[in-house]
Amino acid sequence: MLTRLVTREDAEYLFKWRNDPHTIAMSLNSMPVTWDEHINWLRDALNNEKKLLILCYLKNSAPVGFVRFDVYYHYAEVSINLAPHCRAKGYAKKCLTAALERFKKEFQSSTLIKARIKVENEASKRLFTGVGFLYLRTQNDIAFFTLDLSAYSKI
């Protein structure tokens, strides 16, 4: 799986994927976003050195997924979204693994990665545990997972 940083030109992909009904149902923020909200968010995110937005794609292919890292002082939070037509094809694990490797190179000081996943999102829970995340706890219908990148090796 190949990765590159997101650019403003990716706005349409990301907007469509974000407002996909399944994405909305599985997102912590289960409300659709408007184009203006999306463009403002993307502009702010691209200008924020504490965010890493990664697009995953196959060689000679349109993007298949998006991984976002929000970097905090001692940790980073990760989220992933696949293009709707790319789900259930084995791309999620490859995309997340490649994005973690990219993150490791870009942010060497942040070694703890956290993920918050809706309890009913079984696919994401399997994905994150499948790449080495450990379940911590569940609170308010959100499952918390963590990965120590200093001990992480590519799967």
Image (cartoon, helix red, strand yellow):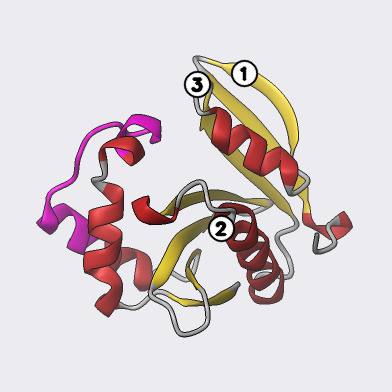
- Give the position of the N terminus as an image quadrant: bottom right
Q: Quadrant of residue 130?
A: top right
Residue at the limit of the structure toward the front, as seen here: 89
**Disc nearest the viewer among 1 and 3:** 3
- Give the position of the C terminus as an image quadrant: bottom right
Return the residue at label 2.
Answer: 91
Q: Residues within 10 Å of mark 1 (few under 14, many from 20)?
A: some
Q: Mark 2: which secondary structure?
A: helix
Residue type highlighted by circle 2? Tyr
Q: Is residue 71 visible?
A: no
Return the residue at label 3.
Answer: 120
Mark with earlier residue (2, 3)? 2
Mark with earlier residue (1, 3)? 3
Q: Quadrant of residue 33?
A: top left
Residue type highlighted by circle 3? Glu
Q: Residues within 10 Å of mark 2 (few under 14, many from 20)?
A: some
Range of magenta residues:
24-41
Q: Quadrant of residue 139?
A: top right
- Mark 1 and mark 2: span between their CA atoms? 26 Å
Mark number, residue 44 = none
Q: Is residue 12 above or below residue 113?
A: below
Q: Is residue 135 visible?
A: yes
Q: Residues within 10 Å of mark 3 (few under 14, many from 20)?
A: few
Mark with earlier residue (1, 2)? 2
